[in-house]
Image (cartoon, coloured by chain):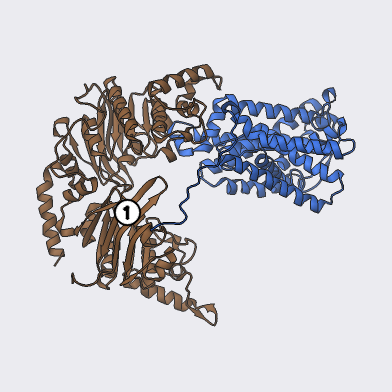
Amino acid sequence: MEQAEPLLRMESITKTFPGAVALQDASLTVARGEVHALVGQNGAGKSTLIKILTGAHHRDGGTIIFDGRQVDFHSPQQAQANGVSTIYQEVNLVPFRSVSENIFMGREPRRFGLIDRRRMNDDAKALLARFNIHVDVTQPLLTFNVATQQMVAVARAVSFQSKLVVMDEPTSSLDEREVATLFDVIRQLKSEGVSVIFVSHRLDELYAVCDRVTIMRDGRTVESRPMSEITKLELVARMLGKELGEVRRSGATGFGEGVHHAEDQLLDAEGLQRDRVLQGASLSVRAGEIVGLAGLLGSGRTETARAVFGADPIQQGEVRVDGKAVRFKSPRDAIRAGLGFCTEDRKTEGIIPHMSVRENLTLALLPTLTRYGIVQRDKQQAIVDRFIERLGIKTSGPDQKIRELSGGNQQKVLLARWLCMNPRLLILDEPTRGIDVGAKGEIQALINELADGGLGVLMISSEIEELTEGSDRIVVLREGKTVAELSHEQVTQSAIMGAMAHGQEDAVPAASAAVAAKEGQAGG
Amino acid sequence: MANADTTVRGPARRWVLPERFRGVGQTYGALIALLLLVLFNLLFTKNFLTEQTLYVNLTQVATVVIVATGMTLVIATGGIDLSVGSLMAIAGALAPIIFLSHIPPLENPLVGNTLAFIIPVLVAGVFGLFNGTLVTRFQIQPIIATLVLFIAGRGIAQVVTNGNLQPFTNPGFQYIGLGRPLGVPLQVVLMLVIVALFAWIMRVTIFGRYVLAVGGNESAARLAGVPVNFVKLAVYGISGLLSGIAGLIVIARNASSDANLVGLDMELDAIAAVAVGGTPLTGGRATVVGTLLGALIIQLIRYTLLVHGVPDAAARLVKAAIILLAVYIQRQRRS
């Protein structure tokens, strides 16, 4: 089996985008009839690699050998015609057309030059029946749930006689039962000799359905192993680029040492639930402490923050501020209660690009700077000047448009937007992502200083150092649920990674053994 | 693998206005275009430099400017309002019903005329809020949401008037369209006051900032505590109110109200004025003064072509070409 020529071999793929290297010497080998997991943190290069394979991007270097031939697809259509189909997270079919039309779009069976509807419907029905899906194929796609739509996408992909189906986070909008159905389909494909590349952030799913895993980090392939030979903990460690058992090391960040003197309880969130993304997230923050919120991508960190801040509704659970239950209907309510939320994605949820540094900085504070609805320019100016100086924001002046600033300086303006409110609790979602090292250290030092001054901080970060060094306590989320809380003494990188991978920090050995046992059985 | 096409071109150097004139810069192109048009007419059009020519042009453009001012605000939030012409028709249909009514309190010309000003404008404002509700609460795309009243609004006006032309003579009411305090047409005064008011609002008030913030990045604005839905409701409401005022001016000038014609094509004229004036349709930026200039440019083109005897069909083409050119120039400058 091992000796057989693999279906796909991507070797030494490189890709550079203006200003950034997306892929550097990335490789991926997929055997025939294999379900292959592709994992990595945000920005690791998974999507870029897949897009190069499917012809959506063009590589700068490297070779792709598919089905014994060297290939160079110029478009997803061409890739599809040659046996590589892709299924995206969002179903990209035509919602108003029928199921069968969607499956055969662009190559409808014809008779006398007209579409042979009966044959098309029969073929569609037969195709779906292979996956044990029985629906009325003449109904428009939008009348079915997302899972069925997803299956239709799979059926369409298979009907192209695909040899390889790429699934990019296909399960993110499915519920558990629907995921099970999708897995049945994947197993069916496998039994027919079709290979699948499966991208997901849910580790359990990988172990449930995949044979082999390739781990990417920083645009490189770091490891490729049979799923049964790698424990969840190892997997997480490889994704994050940490050695197992690496001890806590100080001084790599701007946080400095020591614990903050935590005071009164400020925020309690208990059992937050929303759809499938939050399933019992709980945390608490006291005044003057930094609480880290850890978890893999898709574990519900940002969603928890948004729920606390009133940006998304919660279906169950309770948020208390100063011990009193609150129900924020909008961020506006949360802001009034003394909360601030610095978002992860500066571009889409932070800056107002065409507005000046001045207006961006004072956007949240504006109501208190006005009299009779008129903005008092002198007051506004004083605040802006103070924070530009205090945070060392490099700008040609308060009138400069914020989009002209560097990432680090934009982030400082956004921090200032909240700091000038004099908040009691600040939620920081990836406060140092995508900014240069210098600004990073400065921002970390600033957060530290603010906590010393009594501010409660809830910090989401994907960087383990930032969490271990910056946090007084760490709450770990997994699949929308709080699975562990580590006190300052317990915080080590491996403890966090263990909790991220398994749920409880003390269950590591048992879980690994279970995985090994399960995989041993599956690998036979 | 050497790639032949790797020459990286830096951003072309552009002449950039000093910081503090950036705001003016946005309207600069429109101003130059307007001056060129005036210059052309001074040279080639007989009797251009007369009070009469000035007022003919200004009275013709007044309603467009008033409506386009509201449109500027809506567009600044990233929306659009197609219903303005229909709302003009509704206001225009209601006013004569009120002042021609024989219900006792309304028979008093003072009461009747006052209410004939106030009620139709408020009704148009309420219809504007209806637009805003569709956009905010029901999350319908603005172009579709306002298409509802674009279609239904004129129907409402026709139903209210049974589809009949309503002729009238009412000097008290018609003052809004025909009055000339100190020799200046009242509608021109009204236009300038409205432009000045909203230019001021956009410059100095928190509301103006919020409008731009919502259009610039809605989710960021919401997370910063901006009352996004209120702001959107307000701009559609304002657009409705201003359409109502414009509707009254039109019927007062015509001494009749025709639900089929009042405000016809106004949405297109208003959007064109906004675009030519330098407000991008993507939202987040706005210049009310620019909109005034944009409307003046379009009006002056129309006038120029008319007095020089260009056939109407050709005139439309020229107008379209110039709008295209104006917007193209602004795109160039922005990027």
Q: Which residue is drawn at 44% across and 31% down?
A: B224
Residue A86: image location, x then y, percent: 37, 62
Q: Is residue A291 visible?
A: yes
Q: Mark 1 points at which residue?
A: A46
Tell me which corner region of the image, top left, top right, bottom left or bottom right, holds residue A445.
Answer: top left
Q: Which residue lies furthest to the right in this view?
A: B46
Residue A106: image location, x then y, percent: 48, 70
> Residue B253 or B223: which is nearer the viewer?
B223
Q: Is residue B257 visible?
A: no
Q: Badge 1: how crowded within 10 Å, few (<14), some, or many (20+)?
A: many
Q: Which quadrant: the N terminus of chain A? A: bottom left
Residue B204: image location, x then y, percent: 58, 24
Q: Which quadrant: the C terminus of chain A? A: bottom left
Tell me which corner region of the image, top left, top right, bottom left or bottom right, holds residue B41.
Answer: top right
Q: Which residue is drawn at 68% across and 34% down?
A: B242
The brown one among the chains is: A
Q: Chain B is drawn in which colour?
A: blue
Q: In this view, does A14 lie above or below B51?
A: below
Q: Is residue A379 above or below residue B20?
A: above
**Chain letter behind tag 1:** A
Whether residue B299 sits left or right of residue A256 in the image: it is: right
Residue A179: image location, x then y, percent: 29, 58
Q: Residue at x 19, y 46 (%)?
A: A237
Q: Residue at x 15, y 60 (%)?
A: A519
Amino acid on which the number 1 mark rests in the picture: Lys
